[in-house]
Amino acid sequence: MDKILIVDDEQKIRGMIKKYAEFEGYKTDEANDGMEAVLKARKTNYDVIIMDIMMPDLDGFSAVKEIRKTKNTPVIMLSARGEEYDRIHGFEVGADDYVVKPFSPKELMMRVAALIKRSKAGGGEAHETVKFEGLTVDFTGRLVYVDGQPAEMTPKEYDLLFYFVRNNGIALTRERLITEVWGYDFYGDDRTLDSHIKLLRKSLGEYSRFIVTLRGVGYRFDGPRQ
């Protein structure tokens, strides 16, 4: 049975998420602050961690950063604030998804299911490496090199770049990118995608030029074929 760690200093919110999660068949555990979450994440292998940002003792950003030192557990961040800075910072410290309060518990469970599915689907493919000028993408090793130097990227940056590369030269709508990379239906909020595109472009440096914005449509990866 898949297990979820629910982290929030508000018992009411933890209880609501717990109720929906257990209805969907998940086993749950709770933490009421970031420090408790870090300690539990070190001792237990969770399938997904749902992490609030604003908490006493240790905030959600700091907690995820600590957890990422030893675990790659998928993390969904919860916040009452939807500013771009907060979303980008969450992705930078290692979060996989970002949900703004108030949120739909049903949608949250869909995102949990999508993260678990993608996490379990990783690996098993033949070794494959693709190179575009000084940009090297190693699918099997889940590595990216920029001019020979390993790029440090968030989990979703890797997913997004790998999807772009596998669809090199193809116009991709925002809806398709959200559905294929995040794994859940598109809900009309594309700020998550835009935030990750900004992070990815920053990580790729001069090779960010391969990601072309298609006004009114989405994006296209134009990597020169070797």
Image (cartoon, rainbow, N blue to C red):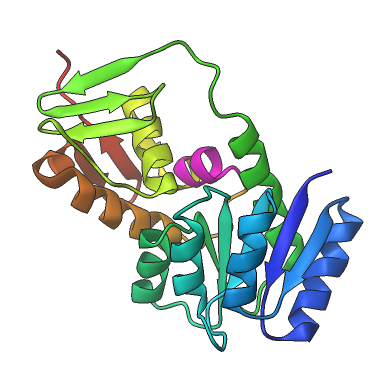
Q: Position of residue 145 (x, y in %)?
A: 21, 32
Towards the viewer: 165 or 136: 136
Res 169 visible: no
Nearest to the observer: residue 150 or residue 179 = 150
Position of the N terminus by quadrant? top right
Query: Residue 146, percent across and down?
Result: 15, 36
* Residue range (magenta): 177-183
Residue 107 inside the magenta-drawn segment: no
Q: Which of 165/129 is in front?
A: 129
| Residue at 51 percent of width and 81 percent of height | 58
Give the percent coordinates (x, y) of residue 25: 88, 50
Q: Residue 132 appears in which quarter of the rendering?
A: top left
Q: Is residue 196 left or right of residue 187?
A: left
- The image shows residue 184 at horizontal and vertical percentages of 62, 47
Magenta stretch: includes residue 180? yes
Number of numbered discs:
0
Residue shown at the point (23%, 42%) measured from the top left: 151
Give me the residue at 39% from left, 30% from top.
142
Q: Is residue 65 left or right of residue 14?
A: left
Q: Is residue 175 visible?
A: yes
The structure residue drawn at horizontal position 65% and vertical position 79%, both measured from the top left corner, is 102
**Vertical side of 135 occupied by 107: above or below:** below
Q: Nearer the viewer, residue 119 or 222?
A: 119
The majority secondary structure of the magenta stretch comes to: helix
Q: Say which quadrant the C terminus sits in.
A: top left
83 over 165 or under it: above or below: below
- In the rendered image, the residue lying farthest to the bottom is 56
Vertical order, 161 against 138 (above or below): below
